[in-house]
Image (tube, rainbow, N blue to C red):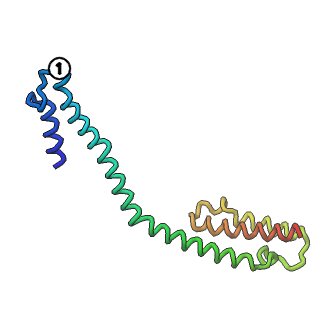
Amino acid sequence: MRFLIYLVLILYVISPYDIVPDFFAGLGWIDDLIILGVLYWYHFIYRRAKMRARYQEAYHQEGEGTKREYYQEEQQQKAQTDRRFSKRDPYQILGVEKGAPLNEVKAAYRKLAIKYHPDKVNHLGDEFKVLAEKKFKEIQEAYQELVHK
């Protein structure tokens, strides 16, 4: 159908039979310019805006709802993880006995930091990287708490 509309309008522009005859030099081209302007507007402005609106509507209906739910679940898991980690004993996190000397705490921190650093597990995938980041932050917090007592 669109092809037919384009064809009719282009044939009108080319045709010698117009609403305003073309033998009037400037005045006869006005209707042709109007038709060309309408063709340009329809093809380059209206159709693209309509397609963009249709795409955004489909995106909001199908994709965004599931994304929103996914991010809400992720935030809930993060909050649960943060609550769980914040209640743990820093000595237990670093794997040292209570009242351990500072050099033992530092050695345990270095060992765990090397093991759980996010850059060390980057090749394993995003899930492991996220878990390693959480664990590494927990280790850092425990170390800061013990060193700055």
**Residue 64's spot in the image, x, y percent?**
45, 65
Q: Position of residue 14 (x, y in %)?
A: 14, 30
Q: Position of residue 56 (x, y in %)?
A: 39, 57
Identify the residue shown where x is 13% and y is 24%. 22
Q: Who's the residue at 64% across and 74% down the image?
A: 79
Find residue 32 and report its image quarter. top left
Question: In the picture provided, is 90 more to the left or to the right than 125?
Answer: right
The residue nearer to you, when weighing 135 against 54, is 54
- Give the residue number, with chain letter if any, for mark 1: 25
Q: Residues within 10 Å of mark 1 (few under 14, many from 20)?
A: few
- Residue at image location 79% in from the left, 71% down from the top: 142
Task: Give, as a three-letter code, the residue at label 1.
Answer: Ala
Residue 33's place in the image compared with 143, above or below, is above
90, 116: nearer the viewer: 90
Residues 145 and 23: in front is: 23
| Figure quadrant of residue 105 | bottom right
* Residue 123, quarter of the rendered image: bottom right
Q: Is residue 119 above or below residue 73?
A: above
Label 1 sits on a secondary structure element that is loop
Across and down, in percent, residue 48 comes to 32, 47
Q: Quadrant of the C terminus?
A: bottom right
Residue occupying the point 39% across, 66% down: 62
Using residue 97 as the reference point, say whether residue 119 is left or right of it.
Answer: left
Q: Is residue 57 left or right of residue 17?
A: right
